[in-house]
Image (cartoon, rainbow, N blue to C red):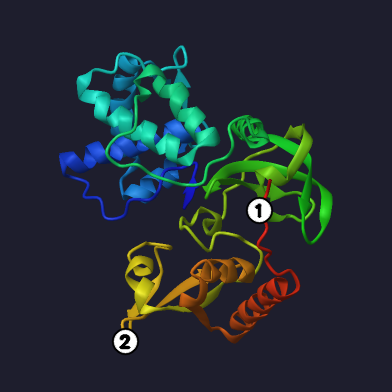
Amino acid sequence: MAVSVFSPREPGLRKKASGDRFSRVLRILLSLLADGTLDCERCCTRFEISLRELQRDLSVLRSLGRDFGFSLSNARSGRITLVRSAGRLAKLGNAQAETAAMLAGIGRALGGPVESEVRSALGDAAGGPGFLDLREPRPRAGAEVSAMFAAVKDAAATSARLAFSYTTAREGPTLRRVEPYLVIARSGRYYLVAFDLARKDWRNFALDAIAEPIRRDGTFTPRKVPDRFRREGAVGWIRTGEPLEVTVRVAATIAGAVTSREWQPEQRIERLADGSAAIALRFDDQGEAVRWALQFGAEAVIVAPPEVAAAARETAERIAGNYATNPCRDERVS
């Protein structure tokens, strides 16, 4: 599960229906609760509305804010900021209780910083779990990533450059100087999207791989985040090279489950005569493609392109080798 600090795109919303407008306003509020800011241009594109229509939606939220304990700033560099009053959305009545429970449930499912953000906004209205119970890996309570999330969020809001040590398996610890923009949450792990000043390019940084101390290093004029980093999907968002279309064939036993989910908006699915399915997805990072396919064990195989299939085969051979050289022992832990 991958979630941007901006709420997920909802294609095909009809602009004239009042129910759709309510849904849109609710999703705008959810974006503000999760991130604290809203990119006006991107919001208009996502919902296929004009700037004037967005201003009307924001007017509705400003009216709600007077009752629920928040306000919205004026647009600055194309962004709106949520300002909380006393840290809570107050006076939630019975009519709003179901919405509050839904928002709280999303926060609990994502855990860590997102849960903290939603809880601070909803306060005592967060309530218990509702009918839909989402289960995703969560950051541990009190884990360092929560403090790191707060630091990079504050830096992004004030256009402050950051300097920190970042560790990767390939390079080890290196000093990075970046302009922070947004955070993506995926399966309990958080990734900062930032412009790397030394590499003069955009990068993803896992928050748990950033070492303290993290310090501010001047300010910057915000850039437009490339569309490839805005593209929202559960897979294919790690940016390390040129994009490839990877085709994975999944067995009939799991075809229904795998093809029932939108891994990417642009995915292509072909159901085959024997009940299996071929799903084509785009990846910049071959390693991500291999890891995605391997999660389904022997019931999925990469069939194209050849170089990614070869990488998957090599990984599977290394896994088999690990089990051959480190056999499991039937030992009891006392």
Q: Upstream in the sequence, badge 2 or badge 1? A: 2
Lateral position of residue 207 relative to residue 270, left or right: right
Residue 64, above or below 284: above
Secondary structure of residue under mark 2 = loop
Residue 223, above or below 145: below
**Distance (Cα) linking label 2 and label 1:** 44 Å
Q: Residue 105 lies in what quarter of the image?
A: top left
Residue placed under numbered mark 2 in the picture = 274
Q: Residue 161 lies in what quarter of the image?
A: top right
Please say whether residue 233 is visible from this viewpoint.
yes
44 vs 150, nearest the viewer: 150
262 vs 16, nearest the viewer: 262
Residue placed under numbered mark 1 in the picture = 332
Q: Position of residue 140 (x, y in %)?
A: 59, 37
Q: Position of residue 251 (x, y in %)?
A: 40, 78
Three-letter amino acid code at the position of disc 2? Asp
Q: Position of residue 297 (x, y in %)?
A: 51, 72
Residue at figure coordinates x 74%, y 37% from the top left: 162
* Tally of numbered tags: 2
